[in-house]
Amino acid sequence: MEILNARHNMTLLKEGQELTCMTSGIRPPATITWYIDGQKVNNGSLITYSTSGNDTELYTSYSSLRLMGNSSVETRIVYCEGSNIREQSPVQSESVRVQTLCKSISCIGLHV
């Protein structure tokens, strides 16, 4: 289980860019859950899923999390967790430190 498009020390993303989590070699396919600063991400509009494989193969599952900017320049800790009905406990990716850069005036709280 890993976050594909992130550096391990610090990742800078523009508002709206995505992090992608992948889990592979498992059957049935994994359910992937995202966490930001230890809190489960519940906003479904920011998360997408896809799975490849079939009943005779092992599956690869992907999930992407779109990060939105905010007015503060805070570093957030992001990780993903994969689980399926056969595993006793979820598998967690490494945590990634992320700063999201605003690309719009409304993102930083300024109104013209």
Image (cartoon, rainbow, N blue to C red):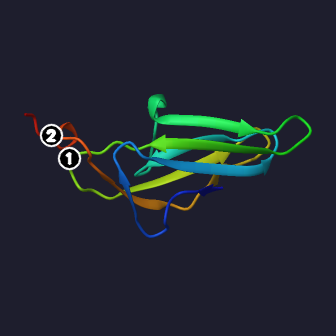
Which residue position holds label 2? 109
Residue 92 is situated, as x and y percent measured from the top left of the image, at: 60, 55
The answer to whether 81 appears left or right of 25 in the picture is left
Q: Secondary structure at mark 1?
A: loop
Q: Residues within 10 Å of mark 2 (few under 14, many from 20)?
A: few
Instruction: Please state, as top left, top right, bottom left or bottom right, where the N terminus lies in the image.
Output: bottom right
Asked if 38 appears above or below 107 in the picture, the reply is below
Which residue position holds label 1? 71
Instruction: Please state, as top left, top right, bottom left or bottom right, where the C terminus lies in the image.
Output: top left
Residue 72 is situated, as x and y percent measured from the top left of the image, at: 21, 51
**Marker disc for residue 56:** none
Residue displayed at 11% across by 39% down = 110
102, 32: nearer the viewer: 102
Mark 2 and mark 1 in contact (Cβ < 8 Å)? yes
Instruction: Name the residue type under label 1.
Output: Ser
The answer to whether 59 appears left or right of 110 in the picture is right
Asked if 55 appears above or below 17 in the picture, the reply is above
The answer to whether 31 appears left or right of 48 in the picture is right
Q: Quadrant of residue 94?
A: bottom right
The answer to whether 6 appears left or right of 54 in the picture is left
Residue furthest left as drawn: 112
Q: Residues within 10 Å of mark 1 (few under 14, many from 20)?
A: some
Instruction: Name the residue type under label 2.
Output: Gly
Q: Quadrant of residue 48?
A: top right
Residue 38 is situated, as x and y percent measured from the top left of the image, at: 44, 50
The alpha-carbon separation of the residues under discs 1 and 2 comes to 6 Å
Residue 76 is situated, as x and y percent measured from the top left of the image, at: 36, 55
15, 45: nearer the viewer: 15
- Earlier in the chain: of badge 1 and badge 2, it is 1
